[in-house]
Amino acid sequence: MDYFEYRSGELFAEGVPIRRIAREVGTPAYVYSLATLRRHFRVFDQAFAQLSHLVCFSMKANSNLAVLRAFVKEGGGFDIVSAGELFRALKAGAEPKKIVFSGVGKKKQEIEYALSAGILMFNVESEQELALLNEIARGAGKKAPISLRVNPDVDPKTHPYISTGMKKNKFGIDVQRSLEVYKRALSFSHLEVVGVDCHIGSQLTTIPPFVDALSRVKVFVEALRKEGACIRYLDLGGGLGIRYKDEEPPHPEEYAGALIQGLEGLDVTLILEPGRVIVGNAGILVTEVLYLKETDEKKFVVVDGGMNDLIRPALYGSYQGIRPVVERKGEMIVADVVGPICESGDFFAKDRQIPRPQPGDLLAVMSAGAYGFTMSSNYNSHPKAAEVLVDGENFDVVRARENLEDLIKGEVIPPALQ
Ligand SMILES: *Cc1c(COP(=O)(O)O)cnc(C)c1O
C-alpha cells in the first residue's frame, strides 16, 4: 500500500497535490512519500518480530540522505557496497554496528574506511578479498568481522541482469568451495568469522528460491560452529519483489513466515537487506509533456525526463506505470512515452494506452522509488532531477535540482589549450 492517490481527479502524494510540487520545484522531479517509506519499513521489520533480526536497507536502491535518515529513525541499518555509501550512511546518522558491506570489488581504501568506522561485518566475495582484508586489519591492529557471501546456485527466476546467486554470476563464492574457503578464513589471524551471507537476486516474485537458498547456506552455520567459529549472523540478502504491473509478489509476512520456518532451531541473528520492496512504490518520477509527435505508424509522447533520470526501462526493458497527474477524460491513444535523450532506448513506456496528453501536462512515472535516482546520470548533459520528500501536508526538497555549473564541476581546460 502507498500514499499516492487521486483526489477529485488529481494525483496527490499524501496531502500534497503533485501539481503543486511540479509548479514549485519544476520537472523532472522524484517525489517520495515519507508515510509510505515508514509503512513499508515497519511492515517488513515487524514481519520478523519474533526473531532476533536486523533490517539493513540496501542503500543502492535509494541513497538520498533524508530517506536514509527516516530508516535510521526506525532503527534500521544499511547494506552498503562502496565507501560513498558508507559516507552517506554515516552522514545520515547510522550506527556503524548496523552496517554490512557487500560487493565484489571493494578497494583497499574502502576496506580501510569501513574498518576504521567499525562496521558490523564485511560480506566477503572472494579469496583474494579475504587475504587483503586480513592484511589491512593486521596493519590497523584490528580483527575484521566477516561473513562469506556464498553463491548458492539457485535460480531466482528474475531478469538475468538482476540475478546474482547462480553459478554463472560474478557474485559470492561457489557453494561447493565455500566450506574450504571458510576454513581458510578461520586460519587468518586478523579475521573473525561471524556470519554466513547470500543474496540471490532482485525483484523475486516467488518464495521457493529464497527457501532453497536458505537451506543451502544454513548448513554452513552448523559446520562452522563445529570448526569452532562463533557464528552469530545469517544474512539472507534482499530481493523481495514489488508490483510494477501485474506481478503478485509475496507479502513480507509470507516471506518472513517461510524464512522463519526454514530457520527453525538455528540460533542466529537474521540479517535482511531489502531495497526495492521498501522504497520502490514509495516514489514517483514527475515529468512534463513537451510534445506529442504523431506519424502514420506511431505516436510519441515526448517528456522532459529520460533514461538519464530513470534507466530501468532502457536497461531491463522493465515496465513502469504511467499516470496523468490530472486525470483527463476523452480520447485514449496508444503511444511510446519517450525522453529527450538521443538514444532509441530512451523510453519510459512502449505502445502504452494513455489519455491523449497536451504539451504542459504532467505525467507520473510510478514505482520509481528504487533504482531510480541512484542510477541516474548526466548523459546528454542534463542536470540531475530534484528529489522531494512529502510528509503529510508538507514537502521538502531533499536534493536540489542540479544546475549548469554542477555539470562541469571538477572539469579543467589544461593550460596548453587555453
Ligand atoms: C542489491 C542488493 C540488495 C537489495 O536488493 P533488492 O532487490 O533491492 O531488495 C541486497 N543485498 C545485496 C548484496 C545487493 O547487492
Image (spheres, rainbow, N blue to C red):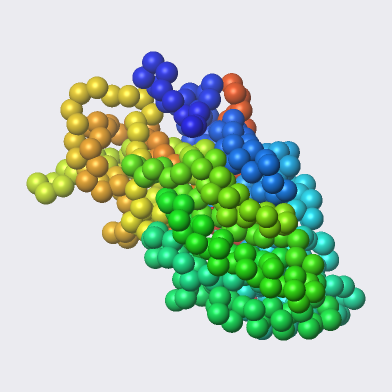
Residue in the picture at 59% in, 36% down: 43
The residue drawn where x is 60% and y is 49% is: 260
Give the quarter of the image for residue 117.
bottom right
Residue 79 seen = no
Q: Residue most toward the right?
A: 141
Q: Position of residue 124 (x, y in %)?
A: 67, 72
**Residue 49: percent from left, percent from top:** 67, 40
User: Which quadrant of the structure image shows residue 33?
Assistant: top right
**Image quarter in which the C terminus is found:** bottom right
Residue at the (30%, 47%) spot, across then down: 349
- Residue 1's place in the image compared with 95, above or below, is above
Q: Position of residue 289 (x, y in %)?
A: 33, 37
Q: Is residue 325 above or below residue 240?
A: above
Farthest-out residue, top: 8
Residue situated in front as seen by the camera: 223 or 110: 223
Residue 268 locus on image (x, y percent): 72, 57
306 vs 178, nearest the viewer: 178
Q: What residue sits 44% from the left and 37% below the top?
A: 286
* Residue 272, placed above or below residue 25: below
Report whether 261 appears left or right of 268: left
Q: Is residue 188 left or right of residue 141?
A: left
Looking at the picture, tell me which residue is in the foreground, 262 or 16: 262
Foreground residue among 389 and 37: 37
Judge left or right: residue 204 versus residue 81.
Answer: left
Is residue 120 in view?
A: yes
